Image: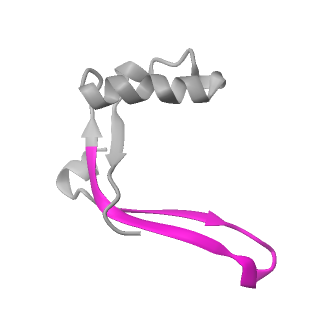
């Protein structure tokens, strides 16, 4: 995450792979990233939502971890 402090410009690609290439799909998101540390209001509100959605991570100490926030600017 130290690279984000130096250059917060990020791009995230989410793709849907298919063997039939004409059916490939992707979304490319451009935005600035921000490192959220435990204790911030946004982090405190969002970590429990993630833990509720995915039972397998319910025991993880997400509140204590840093989170990379990417707020969408262009898709």
Q: Is residue 53 or residue 17 the one in the foreground? A: 53
Q: Dominant secondary structure of the magenta stretch?
A: strand
From the top left corner, tell me how far across and down residue 5 is, in percent: 20, 49
Quadrant in which the C terminus is drawn? bottom left
The residue positioned 21% from the left and 58% from the top of the image is 7
Instruction: Specify the quadrant of the image occupied by residue 32.
Output: bottom left
Coloured how?
A: one colour
Instruction: Specify the quadrant of the image occupied by residue 66.
Output: top left
From the top left corner, tell me how far across and down residue 14 is, in percent: 55, 62
Residue 38 located within the stretch drawn in magenta: no
In the rendered view, tell whether residue 18 sits above or below residue 59: below
Residue 45 located left or right of residue 20: left
From the top left corner, tell me how far across and down residue 1 is, in percent: 31, 44
Name of the residue lying farthest toward the top: 59
Residue 45 located left or right of residue 55: left
Residue 30 located within the stretch drawn in magenta: yes
Magenta extent: 11-34
In the rendered view, tell whether residue 63 sits above or below residue 50: above
Query: How many callouts does the rendering have?
Result: 0
Name of the residue lying farthest toward the left: 6
Name of the residue lying farthest toward the right: 19
The residue positioned 18% from the left and 54% from the top of the image is 6
The residue positioned 77% from the left and 71% from the top of the image is 18
Name of the residue lying farthest toward the bottom: 22
Instruction: Specify the quadrant of the image occupied by residue 68.
Output: top left
The residue positioned 52% from the left and 19% from the top of the image is 60
From the top left corner, tell me how far across and down residue 35 is, in percent: 27, 40
């Amino acid at each position: 995450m130290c690279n984000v402090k130096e250059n917060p410009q990020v791009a995230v690609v989410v793709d849907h792979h298919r063997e039939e290439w004409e059916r490939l799909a992707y979304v490319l998101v451009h935005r600035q990233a921000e490192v959220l540390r435990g204790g911030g209001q946004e982090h405190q509100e969002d970590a429990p939502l993630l833990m509720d959605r995915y039972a397998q991570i319910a025991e993880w100490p997400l509140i204590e971890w840093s989170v990379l926030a990417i707020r969408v600017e262009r898709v």
